Image: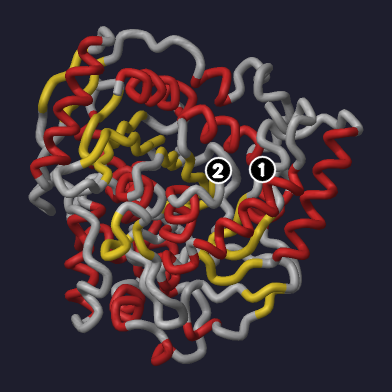
Amino acid sequence: MALRRGEVRSVELVEQALAHAEVHDELAPWVRRSPRSALAQARRFDRWIRAGRTLPPLAGLPGGMKDLDPVAMGRTQFGSRAFRWLVTPTDGPVTKRVRAMQPILGKLQTSELGILPVTETDLHPPTRNPWNPERSAGGSSGGSAAAVAAGTLPIAQGSDGGGSIRIPAALCGLFGHKASRGLHPDFFGAYDAAGLSVAGCLAQTVEDAAAWMDGFLGQTYAPDAPTPGSLLAQARGSVPRLRIRLVTSSSLSNPPEAWVAATLRAAELLRAAGHEVAAAPMIEDVSVDDFLPLYGFLMGSIPILDDRRLQPCSRYVRSCGKGWTRKRVEAHAAQLVGRVDAWWGDVDAVLTPTCGAEAPRIGAWRDLPGDEVFHAAVPLGAFTAGFNIGGHAAASVPMGLDGQGLPVGVQLVMPKGQDGRLLALCRVLEAAA
């Protein structure tokens, strides 16, 4: 609101963010920054605010673009040597929506092709966790998470195809929202036959994330007067008594004790808020082998002239989609959605740890073969990827620190289309925690 009241200018915020980014370059959140362009965009927002123009709720706050999304006349490298010199002539659809509400300071790091839940590419230094630089910030939206957690950005764009917003949000002590399938247009088109990936954001609070998503969806309002029915208005609303399934274990991982304890604590806070919480096992009817062809087809559809420029894990994942047609992927995905829905049953929400493993040490998987890297990463996404298959609304909520001083987070999930109610429940938990 300080921006809308004229107490601070967008240019000042961008200048502060650029200076802060220089101080924290050792965390390597950024692929590159574009100060002149960002300041020009900030001056435009300042003019619009002074003129009283109707704007998105967070208009003028500095932001950045994950390096999977094209920016006009800039390099888009997808975290890969295969695209080292690719210059994109126009903004991609995600960038267009972000540019309408935030000055874009530059490109934020991602894992190669957005595949891994750590951000360590062959192009740039590894992205480090601000809470402990010897640990990963997560991925694939690792640059976004590190920039927000370090305090350079108030909020940052990300995307999530198997946990790529929720995992880094949890590892960096942030709130991360994966929108439900169908909330906004599918920006990935023919590449994503299973509808796994969605755009979203990583933020300090639930309300910030809700306001950002409203702006991303084209809504315009002042933050103190959200439009009725907007995600921010729904996030501020009441939540009826819900039946919540509590899950603390998975056949794919052995979650650290601190993450289980945080989930049990969240369950108690939700019970105290009047909700019914009952323990049950994680879905076991969807395996890594079920997920890999969907992911492999998505990654294999990306046109790459020379696979030898890819990291071993990227080559492995792409190979898992060979021989699969779009029609076969769609049929397989529909079958998996049926299994997830059958497991969901009649509960209103699901509560889990966000991650099934703690933040890996930087370089922990550097020398492993591609298939071993992928399977080493599986525990991090043990509780998240299934809900990309199902298309659910899902979010990670910070729940304090473990014994090593590293953040832990819990995941709340609701059926697709219930993003507003999910955000309201997350806000209840955020306030209680």
Does residue 107 sit above or below 431 in this rendering?
below
Whole-number angstrom distance, CA of label 1 to CA of label 2: 7 Å
- Secondary structure found at label 2: loop
- The residue to which callout 1 is attached is 61
The quadrant in which residue 273 appears is top left
The quadrant in which residue 316 appears is bottom left
Does residue 36 sit above or below 64 in this rendering?
below
Front residue (pair 419, 332): 419
- The residue to which callout 2 is attached is 154
**Which residue: 84% across, 48% down?**
44
Q: Amino acid at mark 1?
A: Leu
In the image, 245: left or right of 8? left
- Secondary structure found at label 1: loop
Front residue (pair 257, 117): 257
Q: Is residue 322 visible?
A: no
Q: Residues within 10 Å of mark 2 (few under 14, many from 20)?
A: some
